[in-house]
Each structure stands twice: as C-alpha cells, then as structure tokens.
Amino acid sequence: MRLGTGVRRIVVIDDNEAIQNDFHRILVSTPKSDALADAEAMLFGKSGAPSPKPSMEFDVECASQGQEGLARVERAKKAGNPFAVAFVDMRMPPGWDGLQTIQELWEVDPDLQVVICSAFSDYSWDEIISKLGLSDRLLILKKPFDPAEVLQIAIALSEKWALRLEANLKMGQLEQMVNERTVELTRIAMQDKLTGLGNRAQFTERLTHAIESAKQSQDFAFAVLFLDFDRFKVINDSLGHNAGDCILRGVAQRISAALNIFDPPGNNTLAARLGGDEFTILLSGHPDKLDPIAFANHLLSILLMPYEIDGHSICCTASIGITSSQNRYNTAQEALRDADTAMYHAKATGKARYVLFDRKMHESAVIRLELENDLRHAIERNELLLHYQPIIGLSSGELEGFEALVRWKHPRRGMVPPMEFIPCCEDIGLIIPMGMWILNRACQQLKQWQARHPQHPKLTMSVNLSAKQLKSPDLTRQITEVLNSTGIEPSSLILEITESDMVSDLDASIDVLKHIREIGVGLHLDDFGTGYSSLSSLHRLPLKGLKIDRSFMINLSQRRDYLAVVNAIISLARTLGMTLTAEGIETPDQITMLQTLECDYAQGYYFSRPLDAENAGAIIGRKFTTMFLAA
Ligand code: C2E
Ligand code: MG
Ligand code: MG
C-alpha cells in the first residue's frame, strides 16, 4: 500500500456526469471539456473561477451508482492501491442511496474517508448517525459546493486517511510485537529451564485438556506416568549438582527419544519435569493404541544405561507410577496425585520398576497422610513415651542396661509400634526433633535411675539413631548438650545405628561416628547381618559393639548353618575388639548356645519385654542368673 507518495486516490460516486467532471476538474485541475465549465458554474455558482492549485496530487475515479463505486473501491483495495476519500451523492436512483452505499463501502474498506454530498437538507445528522453510527470518517458537504471547500476537504481528509493508516500500521506492528512476545513468554513460563521439557504448569494444562477430551469421547484415553529416580540424591551429594544437572538433561533427552518412537503423530503427548528428579509423561490417543506399560518398560530399559559424566560412568534407576483415564479424573491434581502414589508403591516394593495405580493405594495414602498429620503433633501433645528393654550380661546374669524403644500412644489407634511410624518420621524430616526428644528423655531416665540406685553407676542406656539423624550437621553438638543437661557420663550412653543407614555415604558417616566416639559415647551396630554393608568396611567403623539380628537366633539350636554364621560373627567381633549382643532371645537353649559361643550380652522376651519406666526401674539390681545358667 502506498502511503508516502503525494498522490491520493479519490472516488466520486454520483449519478450526475457533470458533477463527476466538476470534481475531476477541481481536484485534478484539468477540466475534461469546456462544456462542463457550465455545470461548474451551476454547481458552485461561480463562472470560470480559477481553481486553487491543490497542494497534493489527486487521482480521481468516478462511478454513477453505489454498486459501481463499491466495485472500484473493492478493486483498488485488493490491488493495494486504495482510495483515500469517497465523495458520495445522497440520491442516486434507481440504485442504492448514499447511506447504503457508504455502509457497503466501509464493509470493504473501513479506512475510507467519506463525504456525503447532499443537495437538500433532507438528511439530518440524527438519521445519518442512526444508520452509520458516529464516525470520525464522515463529513457532509452541502450543495452547491465551493471548489475551494471541495479541495480543502479532499486535502484534509486525504491527510487524515494517511495518518490513520500509518497509526493503524504502527498499532498492527505493536500488536504483532506484543503477540510474539506473549507467545515467547508463555513458552518460557511453560518450560523447564534445565531440560527444555514442559514444566508443571504446562503439564497441568495439557492434562486438564486430556481429562476433558476423555470425558467427551470414548475414543480418547490418556495415561500419566510419574517418574522419580531411585538414588538421585546420592549422585547430587557425591558428584555435585553439575553432574546431577547433566544427568537430568540426559534423562530428558532419553524420554523425548522414547516418546518419538512410541508416540503416534498428532497425539497430545507431553514430557515434563516437575522439579528435582521428578518427571511426568502424558500419553494420549485411541484407547486401543495406548500402551503405557510397554512405554514404561521401554523407559526403564533406556534409563538404565549408564551416563558418562566427567569420566565417571553413572547408572541410576527410576521408579514409575502409572494411572490412566480409566480412573475417571476430574482434575489434573487428582491424576498426578494417583500417579505419584503408584510411584511411591514402586519404590516401596523394590524400586527400578513401574506400578499401576489402584484405588486401594489411595486409601493407604490417605491413612498415611492422617498418620503424618497426627505425628506432627505427637510430641507437643505428649503422646510419645519410651519403653525400656533390659540387656543382660550373659556370664554374670546382671542387668547391664536398657534399650530405649519409642512408643506412640495414639488417641484413637492406641499404642502404635515404632516400625509403623519411624519410617514416616524419617520421610517427613520429623525424626530429627523426635530423635532428640527420645535421646533427651532416655538420658533423663537413666540419670534418675542412677541417682536412685547408686550401687549401679555403670548402668547404660542404648538409644536408636536413624539414618536421617546421622546426616544432621548438628548431631554431635546436640548429643553433647543432652549429656551436659542431664549430667550422665558419656560412657553410659550407647547409640545404636543400623548397617543400611551408612551404605549411601560411608565416608561421611564414618566422620560423624568418629566425632561421637570422641565425645566418649559408645556406638553399636544394630540388626547386624541384615544390612548390605560388607564385612570389609566393618573395621573402618569406630564401633564399640555389634548387635546380632534376631533372625539369626530363630532356629539357632536346630540349624547348623545359622550356628556357623553366628560363630563367624562372634569371632569377627572379637578380632575387631568389639562386644557382642544377641537380640531376640526367647528360649533357654538360645542362651545356652550363645554362652557356648561366648557372646557378651543378650536381650529378648525371655528376660523381659520392653517395659514402661516404672516397671523397668523395678528390675534394676535384679539378677537373671538362675534363669539360664541352670540349662
Ligand atoms: P531394634 O532397635 O532392633 O529393637 C529391637 C526390637 O526387637 C524391638 O521392637 C523389641 O521390642 C523387639 N524385640 C526385643 N526382644 C524380642 C524378642 O525376643 N522377640 C521378638 N519378636 N522381638 C523382640 P520394637 O520396639 O517394635 O522396635 C522395632 C524397631 O523400631 C527397633 O528395632 C528400632 O529399629 C526402631 N525403633 C524403636 N525405637 C526407636 C527409636 O527411639 N528411634 C529410632 N530411630 N528407631 C527406633
Ligand atoms: Mg536397637
Ligand atoms: Mg535390633
């Protein structure tokens, strides 16, 4: 479209040929014929008056009827050479009248400036406005015209037309820029920066869309896969976050590649990273074509392949939870929650696998949520208490000390055993404050007993420590504080740790354990024989003793192989200078065997179940000798 040139195009729509010529003469300054000069005189009332020289060049076309005028305007617009101004006669029988003509013209070219040429005052502004609306593109010119007036109007309106077009053009450019930027910002807002996959916002949006589509059509189904890496934290902690990020990017590439193979074109498939090492995948399409299990299997196999990072070959497995539109979701949050629950089950049942969601999982998830909520208030509501199980010296039959075992007196569920709530406390981080409460309470109790039984100053208290507590940077300081505040000897406190707790980061664990030993506190390895730790690393741990797991005591007298293992454990402990405690002693023959093997201490129902503080206090000083030495 030409804007910059001085030539402005004008269309005159009038059924009077003489008037057409007048316009032509006035605007182009070249009368078509002398005969028409008379018409000008008639029209403008001035014979032969010189026309003012236009400051702008005009190109004038004429039409006798509205339809013809419209055709010209349409053609010009299409050719990219539109008219700036139309002078439209009000009456052009038998065709359209002026107002209808103008309506049609604006349909085709809304930028056109229009001058209504009216010989009579038979059209009022009210009528014009009611038909055409209030418009700044409209002027009325009453006949007879003054050539100067015509020229001025033509110049002024052409100028206005050009300015309006320019403004429109700028607005258009601005709008386009805004639109492009909006698209870009939306893309950024919907993308995971690290991997380039979608993010939670995009995934939620697409999943919501898929849920709606599945409601509307039986031919549409979707599946959501929730993927979490099994030991990603270990990678981050040991190799650093840069290595972790590299792996996450590699994972994203593998997921995208898998989708390219499995995803039929046109499907609403999306892979996203929700954060950390959590990824989600949306598969959708015809129910017969959707195979999330095949996809999950493929994913598990390709994710298993090692990643090469800084010269290290790193393997990490993932656990996947799957749910699908068969579960009839209303919101994306519900579907994500269920896929997450299934993923949690995949982890709990062995990791590196997929699990399909079923409703029962949801129920257990709700129960767990309730448990978590109740647990958060357990300490402040005084619902936790400690029971104490005696530990007996096998050669003397004397009470050496107690193991503190936590109990939760739940207002509705009654006494909850630790194995039902300790793992949950570990997951939600509550084990740190709870562990400190336990340590403090157990040490206070020991102090009380020692004060009441001064003849037994060496009575010990064993307290279980969880893996999460070992990772707490404040652990040694807190232990020191508890020792100081309760005033017990460090040597009368024994902390029990389990083998599996230290596997993930042995070196870091060893440092913490050394600090604990430096304070003078004893360390026992609990449940020995059930974890993963290799015997070769045992000598590196600054341990005072080993507790042989209860599982070895069962059938100890019947199974020779068990006996051989326990014998080997006892010799090993001897070599490493550690004491030995046997857990889960229930029968006299177990005691006899252990005595033969020269095990130091024993603990079990045979001597006593864990007791509340009052009953435990009552057995201090009691001898257990007769109960087993007779055997
Ligand atoms: P654990 O530290 O190995 O504690 C010994 C467990 O064996 C106790 O179970 C005890 O009641 C049980 N037991 C003792 N003698 C016998 C026996 O002769 N036969 C049988 N069948 N069982 C026996 P409890 O109290 O249910 O504790 C289970 C586990 O929960 C503990 O195993 C420990 O790992 C954990 N736990 C208990 N209290 C605490 C705590 O205060 N902090 C932490 N972090 N964990 C705790
Ligand atoms: Mg223990
Ligand atoms: Mg144990």
Image: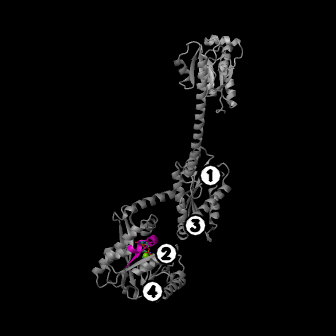
Nearest to viewer (mark 1 / mark 3): 3
- Residue type at mark 4? Cys
The residue carrying pointer 1 sits among few (fewer than 14), some (14 to 19) or many (20 or more) residues within 10 Å by Cα, namely many
Q: In this picture, which residue range is highlighted in magenta? A: 461-477
Badges 4 and 2: C-beta atoms under 8 Å apart?
no
Q: Earlier in the sequence, mark 4 or mark 3?
A: 3
Displayed quadrant of residue 317: bottom right
Q: Earlier in the sequence, mark 1 or mark 3?
A: 3
- Residue type at mark 1? Thr
**Label 4 – label 1 distance at C-alpha:** 62 Å
Secondary element under disc 2, as helix, strand or loop, is: helix
Secondary element under disc 3, as helix, strand or loop, is: helix
Displayed quadrant of residue 473: bottom left
- Indicate the colouring scheme: one colour
Badges 2 and 1: C-beta atoms under 8 Å apart?
no
Q: Position of residue 487 (x, y in %)?
A: 31, 78
Badges 2 and 3: C-beta atoms under 8 Å apart?
no
**Label 2 – label 3 distance at C-alpha:** 19 Å
Judging by the rendered image, the residue that carries numbered circle 2 is 508
Q: Position of residue 429 (x, y in %)?
A: 44, 65
Q: Quadrant of the N terminus?
A: top right
Q: Earlier in the sequence, mark 2 or mark 1?
A: 1
Does 164 sit above or below residue 28? Answer: below
Q: Quadrant of the C terminus?
A: bottom left
Badges 1 and 3: C-beta atoms under 8 Å apart?
no
* Residue 543 appears left or right of 145: left
Q: Which numbered marker is on residue 269?
A: 1
**Label 4 – label 3 distance at C-alpha:** 47 Å
Disc 2 C-beta below 8 A from ligand 1: no
